[in-house]
Image: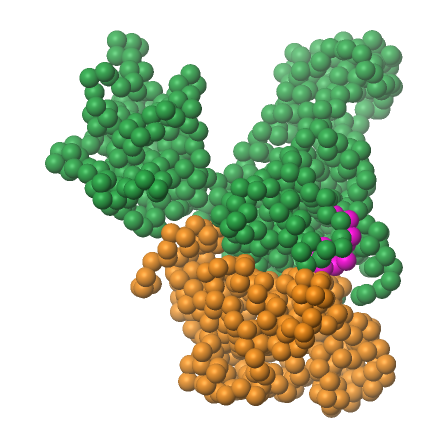
Amino acid sequence: MGSDLKEEAIKRAKVLMVGAGGIGCELLKTLALSGFQDVHIIDMDTIEVSNLNRQFLFRQSHVGQSKAKVARDAVLKFMPHINITPYHANVKDPGFNVDFFKQFNVVLNGLDNLDARRHVNRLCLAAEVPLIESGTTGFLGQVTVHIKGRTECYECQPKPTPKTYPVCTITSTPSKVDFVRELRELFERFKKILKFVHCIVWAKDLLFAKLFGDKKQENDLFVSAGDGSDSEKPTNIFERGSDEDHEQYGRKIYDHVFGYNIEVALANEETWKSRRRPNPIFLKDVLPERLILQNGNLEKNFLTEDLPLSAMSSVGLSNPQDVWSLADNSRVFLEALRLFFGRREKEIGNLTFDKDDQLAVEFVTSAANIRASSFGISLHSLFDAKGIAGNIVHAVATTNAIIAGLIVIEAIKVLQADFQNCRMTYCLEHPARKMLLMPVEPFEANKSCYVCSEVLVELPAPVSSGTMLTVEDLQQELSCHINIKHREEFDEDKEPDKMVLLGWTAREKESQVVSNGNSTSAAVPAAAEATMKSEEAEVNAEISGTKRKLSEISEATENQEASQILPRADADNFKNSQELEDDDDDLVVLDNYPETSKKQRLH
Amino acid sequence: MDGEELTAQETALYDRQIRVWGVDAQKRLSKAQILVSGLNGTSVEFCKNIVLAGVGSLTLMDDRLVTEDALQANFLIPRDETVYSGRSLSELCCESLRDFNPMVRVLAEKGDLAQCEMEFLDKFDVVVVTGCSLKTKIEINEKCRERAKRIAFYAIECRDSCGEIFVDLQNYTYAQKKSDGTAECHLSYSSLEDAILIPWRNLPRKVSKLYFAMRVIEKFELSEGRNPGELSNFDLPAVLKLRKELCDAQSLNESHVPETLLERILVAGPMLYPPVCPILGGILGQEVIKAISGKGDPLKNFFYFDAADGKGVIEDISNPSSI
């Protein structure tokens, strides 16, 4: 495969890498070994200890330094004669604009979040630069190729939430059985932790935020008795009385949030008709008075100055992998509160949850577990709770290495303009049709994709001659002013069928006022003349508002485990994948969209 | 699993992977002793993966001095003659790998594995060989099988953009994950010698073309006394002649071993297609981690990757009599 043409294409290429993390380290190394001479790399992150198990360009001594810069130096050590330009910056910085992107022949993503992926996708589309996108979770990974006008863009398909893996709709045929098993396992694992995730969210976003965060933040942790009596303002509960010591204050909070609040909630019979009723938990039922007073007395033995504050070691618990009993969780909870108020009083009011803050993780773990006991949900170890609370990725070096190799293979095809042979590849944990690495033909663009297609949008207000439309792209801070000079009379035959934007919130009927003939929907008329203008114009808040909302909805899905991965290879696609029996040179062809006609394999 | 707990340092460093394979697997990994004979683009990828994963020790064997060819796809050795001149591959790679994870012992061992005392192998749980002749691979595989303790044997070879991994776990028992808990599962592997002796017409339908191509080239190298990477385009006529002989003897249509595929491999000679190395080294790393930890279904018993079609395929080519 070492043709001169290929070598020439690699040597001349100017490549942008976004992300110098798990995939990024592997990718930069593989690009250098493959003969690339000019690589630019953007990453805003600094190196952490937990990166070192896979981000092999980094060492303990680099902790705290820029990933992009250290990665560059590390690669130059074994490949001194290539150009690597690092940017310790956010890819969303305005400097990385369309013109910046235009200088590259291909963009390679090794990102860990959906927001930045979307941003890069849009810039690549605007700059017309091919994008190779990637992601990994544990042993699963994927590489996809996005070329404007040839394949779908990164946002052509909404990223599925785990809800799109309904077990009942997965049909099992022998060739797909392993893949189905994989999806099923993901789904089962997800279901199991989902209930506990609610407890973590409660402990982290409500309780932790209320006690230690910005007091001015609105927070619906308070449950009033529901009878409208304001005599006992719940706010007082969270303020320590002048005569209270830290222990008394801690016990008061415990009884309030785990006992009283649950009792109040139980009072509303309607809520519990079809649900399991929670049990209020009061401290006296969990820990005998003697133990409460003893709690944390171990402190002198276990706490030294150079170790970070830890409630679990203070109460004599050592293994973060153990699942603690309700009593132990209660002791950790009280001790964590005591330590926060006793030793970290200055920070209170400004704290936000940080997964690397040991005491914060202990507090959230214990609070989530006590709440879980109350609701009959299984308890989790500190290790697991930290993973959920910190939204920590599951990551191993091997998958990242494999994915990096696949990215470079696709990048080289793109650079040679060998688009016919570009593939998306899935790296699987269990083989499907004997394959651990499964290449799939790239999908065609979704014609109604609101990012890469020429979308027809249903406007929220009528358009007539003289209307000024302002379209804003909040991600790229672009705005376009459209001056409607003349709008023709409505003619039903001339209107296209599909004029509603996917995911667009339909407006109330009355807002689609019939103003121009007998139109029932105000579509952008073909006669509208679009002109870019710089002058001020009325901002159409409805358009930007709706769009922002759409992206927030999809954003919320990213936090869920496994939703980033295998976005295309979901049950429906596999159900529709065509069995190709006889020729082993076939590649797997998946249906792009179930509603469109089946795609045929390439010849 | 009993035994000592992981240290706080280990828990912090391995946090992200413990979330993938669990604490018990991590403890087993930290006790595993690995031997790698032959250092090239694919095996250094494997070494990196296994050191990062946190095995107990990794021993490297390759006394060759650094050459241009030996440097390609190797990120462990700086392109600086003043550094590498006069030093062996194993020494240099050992130095770099130590930096990757201070908790893993990385050692360089002098000598030739094929000539080693049998007892030497007893130090290891896993043996990986690459860059040597078929004869050597078979010998080392047999030695591993003769030892009282079970030693997992892997052979990996990358030619141009094509790669092959062979796995021999002998008799392997592990807890297979089922939807309703786990079930004990036994696998019986063939030795390399037995596996490649299986008549071609008895192989599963649609076996990867790479399997046949690798056998033809391997056989040719053996008859010429050359090592992987020492063939070139000039050998094509002779290789095609051998293909015909083998296919005739095995009553297999020659189209199963395409000339274009053989040519592609021969033209490349010693050159590897660099992006294939992390893919093969990654799959091998994953397999060794599975075999040590007893977690996950291990690969049985050949793996193929070709960048030309992008497929990574598992083939089970085992002698039925050994099952």
| Rendered position, B236 above or below A367 | below
**Residue at 78% of width from left, 35% of height from top?**
A100
Left or right: residue B87 versus residue A266 is right
Q: Quadrant of the N terminus of chain B?
A: bottom left
Coordinates of residue A361 in the picture (x, y in percent): 38, 38
Left or right: where does residue B58 sit relative to residue B307? left
Q: How is the image coloured?
A: by chain
Q: Quadrant of residue A437?
A: bottom right
Which lettered chain is shown in orange?
Answer: B
Q: Nearer the viewer, residue A313 or A392?
A: A313
The answer to whether residue A216 is seen in the rendering is yes
Q: Check if residue A161 falls in the magenta segment.
A: no
Residue at image coords 77%, 15%:
A469
**Foreground residue among A522 and A550:** A550
**Which residues make up the magenta segment?**
A30-39
**Which residue is pictured at 32% across the width and 44% down the height?**
A379
Compared with residue A249, is residue A582 higher up or lower down, i.e. above or below? Answer: below
Residue A356 lies, with reference to residue B232, above or below; the image says above
x 32%, y 64%: residue: B3
Q: Position of residue B298 (x, y in %)?
A: 51, 68
- Name the one closer to the observer, A499 or A197: A197
Is residue A443 visible from the viewing direction of this image?
Answer: no
Quarter of the figure with residue A341: top left
- Residue A280 lies, with reference to residue B310, above or below; the image says above
A365 and B8: which is toward the camera: B8
Can you give x and y, in whole percent of width and height, for residue B56 in the image?
Answer: 45, 67
In the displayed structure image, the side of residue A263 where residue B283 appears, left or right? right
Residue A545 spot, x, y in % from top left: 63, 20
Q: Which chain is green?
A: A
Which residue is situated farthest in the front direction here? B82
